[in-house]
Image (cartoon, helix red, strand yellow):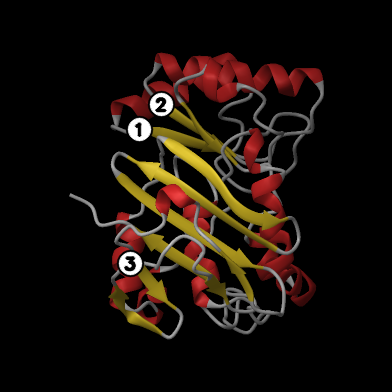
Amino acid sequence: SNGAWNDAPMTPKDRMHTPEARQEEMAWLQRIGASGIKVDFFGGDKQAVMVLYDEILRDAARFGLSVNFHGTTLPRGWSRMYPNFATNEAVRGMEFVTFDQPGADAQPVHCTVLPFTRNPVGPMDFTPVIVDQRLGPAGDGPHRRTRLSFELALPVLYHSPVTHFGLTPSDRRLLPPAAEDYLREVPTVWDEVHYVDGYPGRFAALARRRGQQWWVAGINGTQEEITFVLPEKLSGLPWLTLEDADFNQVAGGERGPHGAPIRLKPHGGVIMWTPGD
């Protein structure tokens, strides 16, 4: 976004802060076939910046561009007002996990809070899923504290119509085939969502429906095993599950009668979905 209030060094700079610069940039993006923009580094919540959000969304709609805001305020009603608003950050996202060890240590608990606090307000571009055991650009940064199942559950647990995974091309070597297939197929927009179980700071489990297909995700922020049960309407269905013990295959079968426990290992998660068409 830039402008006089913002001295962030990242580029391109000063392309969104005035109508003339913004419309020239958006016209060029439209000509080259871009479908959306990601605008970062907004200068607080003062009135001029709040107006700028609306101006960017309106101009982007004129040029057929969707919008993802980062370094931004909470999305208060933008999803209903602007069809081209895709998602925004407004969260202490995955990048903070990579900065230092205290941030990585806090991740399991922090991630269980967001489904109850930040995400109900609007879409949340958390940039989920990290698979390296050591984080940072050189792989010598903080140690990841979560299990792979925890990371893989986040794209279902968190809602963002555009989901950016926190992966690099080289991370594919760390992903078992079944996990890679799951990330390729997991939806990003949903028709229905149900609270299953949880408590902020301990664990969270949600069920989401896309068409006729149901997806369930749960994460455990504690160092103890936690169990939950599916709601009656979802119990007894044929579920495909990625298991902690073996991510090289997808386990199939019913999850038992209503009341049968689903176990979350310490700092672990679960991902389940009903077979598609």
Please report the residue visible at 41 percent of the width from the left and 39 percent of the height from the top. 190
Q: How many marks?
A: 3
- Please indicate whether residue 38 sits to the left or right of residue 204 in the image: left
| SS for callout 3 | loop
Disc 1 or 3, which lies upstream in sequence?
A: 1
Q: Quadrant of residue 53?
A: top right
Visible residue check, residue 130: no
Q: Are marks 2 and 3 in contact (CB under 8 Å)?
A: no
> Residue 150 appears at what percent x and percent y?
55, 69
Residue located 56% across and 83% down the image: 133
| Quarter residue 104 falls in | bottom right
> Pointers 2 and 1 in contact (CB under 8 A)?
yes
Q: Which residue is mark 2?
A: 65
* Left or right, residue 6 beside residue 225: right
Q: Nearer the viewer, mark 2 or mark 3?
A: 3
Q: Which residue is mark 3?
A: 254
Compared to 27, does 197 lie above or below?
Answer: below
N-terminal of the pair, mark 2 or mark 3, is 2
At label 1, which amino acid type do we have? Answer: Ser
For mark 1, give the secondary structure.
Answer: loop
- Quadrant showing the N terminus: top right
Q: CA distance from mark 2 to mark 3?
A: 43 Å
